[in-house]
Image (cartoon, rainbow, N blue to C red):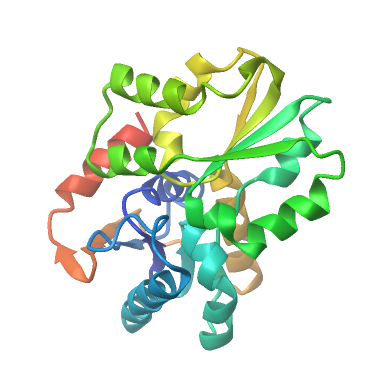
Amino acid sequence: MRIGFFDSGVGGITVLNEALKLLPNEDYIYYADVDNVPYGPKTKEQVKQYVFNAVDFLIRQQIKALVVACNTATSIAIKDLREKYSIPILGMEPAVKPAVEKSNGKRVLVFATELTLKEDKYHNLVTTIDSNNIVDELALPGLVLYAENFVFDEKIIEDYLREQLKRFNLEQYGTIVLGCTHFPFYKNIFERIFREDTDIIDGNLGTVRHLKNILEQKKLLSNSGNGNIIYFSSGRHEHDGGKYKKYLERAHP
């Protein structure tokens, strides 16, 4: 049985990349809801419907566990998914807690989608952790679209980010959080824009470590797989996986 990975588009490839390294003896199904990406500007009701359509499809493929490799989908639907399905379901959330712990008195800047930042799940997380009021946030919808369109021209991306960040004093940030799985594709550009000693955190590896622990606990770990991946675009089987393999190469140079 395979492990399912779901995202609104190609961002979850950055999480799948970590799984391939940590769990190389598993096989995978990757489902990108490319017909409806991006989720960030859409309503909560729309996103919930998209997520359940995708997960219903993946359940029919008899997956043994599911990673909702999308911060927005997690914030909207993870609780309802766990109530409906009996398999292990893991989600993503902006890594605010480790960011605050590592901030050393400096501020923390969280990058995510509009919908993630609007949701109670995010606000409750920040309220619980940010007792010193050091967390700021910024939605970067354009970065999702650049990733979906395979735009990796460094000048285009850097110009976009600098324009979005012009109202921020970058010197005051000790940690930034990449709170959307599309954003780690551009980690090298974030590194160039921020101070050299700024920590850049995402939740990808932590999620995959949690996945491994759960599979071990439930005796679901495989030793017979080889990292084989089946790709679906909004339910359509991508037989050669060509588009997605390019993103996987980008995530794992």
Determine the residue located farthest toward the left in the rendered image.
239
Q: In screen coordinates, is 61 left or right of 224?
A: left
| Quadrant housing the N terminus | bottom left
Q: In screen coordinates, is 117 left or right of 186?
A: right
Query: How far from the left and from the top, in percent, is residue 57?
Result: 31, 79
Q: In the picture shown, does residue 200 fall above or below 189?
A: below
* Viewer-closest of 109 and 203: 109
Location of residue 179 by image quarter: top right
Query: How far from the left and from the top, in percent, is residue 129?
Result: 81, 49
Q: Residue at x 46, y 57 (%)?
A: 69
Q: Is residue 222 visible?
A: no
* Viewer-closest of 235 and 121: 121
Query: How far from the left and from the top, in percent, is residue 79?
Result: 60, 76
* Viewer-closest of 238 and 129: 129
Location of residue 228 by image quarter: bottom left
Q: In screen coordinates, is 116 left or right of 13?
A: right
Q: Is residue 67 visible?
A: yes
Q: In screen coordinates, is 6 left or right of 81?
A: left
Location of residue 169 by image quarter: top right
